Image (cartoon, coloured by chain):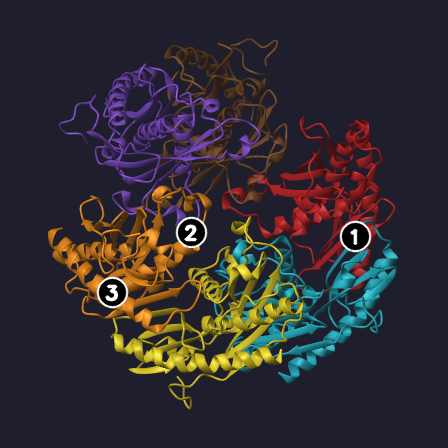
Chain colours: A red, B cyan, C yellow, D orange, E purple, F brown
Amino acid sequence: MRETRKADELRPISIDTSFNRYAEGCALITFGHTRVLCTASMEEKQAPFLRGTDKGWVTAEYGMLPRATHTRGGREAARGKQGGRTVEIQRLIGRSLRAVVDLDLLGPRSISIDCDVLQADGGTRTAAITGSWVAMRIAVNKLLADGIIENDPIHDQLAAVSCGFVNDTALLDLQYSEDSQAAMDANFIMTPSGGVIEVQATAEDKPLHWDQFMALKKLADKGVQELANLQMQAVADA
Amino acid sequence: MRETRKADELRPISIDTSFNRYAEGCALITFGHTRVLCTASMEEKQAPFLRGTDKGWVTAEYGMLPRATHTRGGREAARGKQGGRTVEIQRLIGRSLRAVVDLDLLGPRSISIDCDVLQADGGTRTAAITGSWVAMRIAVNKLLADGIIENDPIHDQLAAVSCGFVNDTALLDLQYSEDSQAAMDANFIMTPSGGVIEVQATAEDKPLHWDQFMALKKLADKGVQELANLQMQAVADA
Amino acid sequence: MRETRKADELRPISIDTSFNRYAEGCALITFGHTRVLCTASMEEKQAPFLRGTDKGWVTAEYGMLPRATHTRGGREAARGKQGGRTVEIQRLIGRSLRAVVDLDLLGPRSISIDCDVLQADGGTRTAAITGSWVAMRIAVNKLLADGIIENDPIHDQLAAVSCGFVNDTALLDLQYSEDSQAAMDANFIMTPSGGVIEVQATAEDKPLHWDQFMALKKLADKGVQELANLQMQAVADA
Amino acid sequence: MRETRKADELRPISIDTSFNRYAEGCALITFGHTRVLCTASMEEKQAPFLRGTDKGWVTAEYGMLPRATHTRGGREAARGKQGGRTVEIQRLIGRSLRAVVDLDLLGPRSISIDCDVLQADGGTRTAAITGSWVAMRIAVNKLLADGIIENDPIHDQLAAVSCGFVNDTALLDLQYSEDSQAAMDANFIMTPSGGVIEVQATAEDKPLHWDQFMALKKLADKGVQELANLQMQAVADA
Amino acid sequence: MRETRKADELRPISIDTSFNRYAEGCALITFGHTRVLCTASMEEKQAPFLRGTDKGWVTAEYGMLPRATHTRGGREAARGKQGGRTVEIQRLIGRSLRAVVDLDLLGPRSISIDCDVLQADGGTRTAAITGSWVAMRIAVNKLLADGIIENDPIHDQLAAVSCGFVNDTALLDLQYSEDSQAAMDANFIMTPSGGVIEVQATAEDKPLHWDQFMALKKLADKGVQELANLQMQAVADA
Amino acid sequence: MRETRKADELRPISIDTSFNRYAEGCALITFGHTRVLCTASMEEKQAPFLRGTDKGWVTAEYGMLPRATHTRGGREAARGKQGGRTVEIQRLIGRSLRAVVDLDLLGPRSISIDCDVLQADGGTRTAAITGSWVAMRIAVNKLLADGIIENDPIHDQLAAVSCGFVNDTALLDLQYSEDSQAAMDANFIMTPSGGVIEVQATAEDKPLHWDQFMALKKLADKGVQELANLQMQAVADA
């Protein structure tokens, strides 16, 4: 449980865009002890279902190292299948990013986002989404700088943050010890100007009141705003 | 696109609780041309991770017959894996139902919900959740009637409905032709008294305004209320 | 065990050709409490191994809803593979149907049959085959009516029925309580004029005499004749 | 196509019971160029579904080496799944053998039959079944000789042979060049005294007359009788 | 443990090149009780990653019959995946053979080697490699004889043998009873003239001295020389 | 290709033992641009095949992030199986570590090593093995410090390095640009005192001379010595 951190305060955030030297875009993002390596790989080939069009695609995969967590979890590659949680999260990441990309302007190419959780202390999906936008932004900037595409296909910025009710208090950016006790857990994926990309709120144990949901929304507005500023700075410094 | 149906009007709903003679609870539910067979199977055994406790569990699986849709889709059993959409939906169904069940009162047994889409015209997940509650309610009523459990573990009712923005209009209970054009698609899982179980809203193509989301919420309140009444009637007639 | 039904009497049979509004051909067939949804999907593409020819193909898949049976069985899609019984049955359905279709006359297209058991009380494979012929007949009639093909590729009719020895009595159309006690279980797939498509007879526990097999054959002739009449009526009414 | 062999004549048959030095029972059986290695492994453990009883079980697995055939086929282990034909055949072998074994007398142990096709020229399933009985007989004889069981659980002998109509002629024991042209292909698994274990007859392309089926049955009686004599000799020599 | 065999003596070796009548090259090789069937299949198609070049490829697969061993092991095809040991061995076989083949001279075709262990008493991988070279040599000789290729793509010969330290003695060609006790197990794949293709040495339980490794190397030189002579004789007799 | 680095010089090596805060032992090891995260997880449960004994086990898993490499590779978890190279490497890591651990002294517990390649520029397996020993050493030191075990089960130290012949020059610690051109690639896993744990040498394209292999061995002695010093320092600083 947070000790000195205030209810509406993010954990310490850092974004390192130089961790991986091969990817076209990279962001090693930390939300407190949560650490996710996001890479964006540009590939000059289309997704199979887009053949015959001039459109591009953005897709994402998510994974967690077995010992990212307090106790070791299984390795999905060894088990031979991705778990339901993994599938759910990677679909969410891809869907969210596509909502701020003009796939026609991207042209007949693909952006593959990989989000790999190196250490997990709650909020891995929101860190992953926030970092992925940075990695994608850097990779697309290279395309523009190299003259491969002319018009910027990214038409908006997005960041994600979780909020939840713990002991009747609305908290921003839950760490694991909070998340595991939350009566409601919500993830907000929004633009700096307040636009909604995706909202997912889930009550645990029993239904909650709508005004509780609205209290979380208010926290998210603040969190997303702060994350968006840090993203812009990381991109500028890259 | 809806022709005579109003923007805030549900499709014709029917709930048949006698379609399957073996399941402890059953609801063949239709939302217009969408038809989902929901069964609740009581099993006197615990989920493996609950061994050593006195708690029960509610789990759900979702499937779609290959020709439920306008054109034939593949059979997941033949492909050897459930798709990401399937996994996402069945996790949602199970999570939602557990939010209205006291797992301690249920005792060391399991309720397995199966939702199989026989025909699909949009809204299969909301029909599945709405029907599953009916099937579960009937199955638990039998446990109570047979004296196997004493106190009702179901502490609330829930129903689900989709809403979306199509051509700048907020519509209740999207059919497929609407869903495929919606700028925002939201699913609300709520109690008759307005409690929130789960909310999922997704913007397509570009971010939306928060007041658009709120307009959908208002439609959902109406839809869930009407569905809840039909559920109670179906349970009473079972 | 059958009570008022005679040894050479079929269970009540019904065939509903309107249950699914999207498939080119459909038959929801019931043999007593056994209920199988058969759909025929026409696809204007060839099976890969026929590329370079002008031939078509008929293929079938079979599945059973988890709670079709008295107690819940596992979901094959969730387990990640089709069981041996499923594979055996779907190969039988496809092979049988192809024996009455001229694949050259069908032309470069495919008929995909899906047989999904909604409720199971014995004889699911014979109900599936009998219903599949109806669904295929209706789908091909549409091709003919639409002028897509000129000559009817279906050169014969077929129906299937099970027979078995229970307590030294030869019985037609076994229900589950009989099937599970039968000393020999045989499935006959035949034409109304007595032609043999496929015969499978299996002794349980110990070998049987050939004249016992012949007694089952005689029952099958009667059953197939009656089923064939019901099929023709269903097609005429479609 | 057979040249000097008569229509009612088996191919040259050989049974070598010493090919594998480790298995409790072994038969390397050849039907002409078809060569199948059958081993019977006794295991002092029960099949899981028999726990709590005193019964045993007989199970079978079937495989084909990739280059057993004229052109190389894929390796099922590398593809990660057994094909439908493999599953069908191994279920048939196990079911047939169990029909001549008293599982109570076998006691709480298992016989695992492995049939691996080293070379294939038609009739691999009938060779496999005929050889498996020999391997099982030898393995059970050891159990009896070692006093591990007192009463012989094998209550009958069985052998299998294929028959078919090629160019309007009924032929016994089809080789591949015949099998691929047969208008009807039937497999008979019978006892030397004419008892029926399993009969499977399949028409290709179009239905056949019942008297054609009966002509095949007559050939099978002769073939099974001859195979049964060779089996007894092989067991005696083992 | 070897009784009359000397420390630097191979087990009795035999190579039968006529066991399989369909493969372009075949060697049923025995090292004592170890018996491996090696086939070489020529296929006039390129490996996918070589499309657009004129090069060929040599690939290998390895398998073990379930009852090749003292007690029955599982069937990889039934388990749905090849074990780690299998994967390791088949990669080794393919890699070794490619080291003596000029893939440009082979031209746009593939050689598929299948090594199936019919009986296993230690040394299956070295027997497999030694036999595979024979099968490949015979298959390529056919290509040359048929004028399909003009220049011999096989530029060297290779054979493989295992060595190990057991009770402080260096032994050539370990049988299973020795292999299971060896403090170091090494496999040498070499040419008759002493060239190195692949060396793998593994210490069990604790590190060994380099001079122990060198003692094994000396034994391997002798063993490979003898195997190479037997290979040439088998090819000459084929 | 190395520019200023000498033929017998390692790349810059670093070992960070604090990267992961949850694992019992951790080493983020870099060999130049190759970066592998090694964690050791202590689990108080036995491997299934050791039940009934007092022994422990050491096992390893290996993975590579999709964009660890110059171009993106597939994700094994998404493909549903680990590739042959992965399986080979993780078996090698586990086997090597077990050669320096007394499994009886370890007692009834397991050490799970995870090696995840964050960036790959050649030599990932040798970096993984070298780092794994550090992670394991730290984890076991904790067990000793906590009094969970009394006697140190690790009886020796090991490190690994690759060597190869490139353009007729023997090079130590190959980077990717060298590895891809090497005529022979060898991996040596040795103790600081020169003991041999595992040696694997593979010739590419054509056989090599034994004295070339010996030249690589000499380089490896130097490299392993240097790595061993860095390991001890990292453990001391942990």
Report, in whole angstroms, how far the alpha carbon at label 1 lies from the one at label 2.
42 Å
Q: Position of residue E183 (x, y in %)?
A: 30, 27
Q: Position of residue E226 (x, y in %)?
A: 24, 21
Q: Secondary structure at mark 2?
A: loop
Mark 1 or mark 2, which is nearer to you?
Answer: 2
Looking at the rendered structure, the kind of residue marked 3 is Leu
Q: Secondary structure at mark 3?
A: helix
Classify B180 as above or below F120.
below
Looking at the rendered structure, the kind of residue marked 2 is Gln
Q: Earlier in the sequence, mark 3 or mark 2?
A: 2
Report, in whole angstroms, how far the alpha carbon at label 3 lies from the one at label 1.
69 Å
Provide the residue designation for mark 1.
Answer: B204
Residue at 64%, 61% in the rendered image? B95
Q: Position of residue D94 (x, y in %)?
A: 31, 60
Mark drawn on residue D219: 3
- Whether residue E9 is visible here, answered yes or no, is yes
Instruction: Decide which of E236, F79 is in the foreground and name it.
Output: E236
Provide the residue designation for mark 2.
Answer: D82
Report, in whole angstroms, how far the alpha carbon at label 3 lies from the one at label 2.
32 Å
Q: Secondary structure at mark 1?
A: loop
Residue at 22%, 36% in the rendered image? E33
Question: Which chain does the numbered disc 2 sit on?
Answer: D
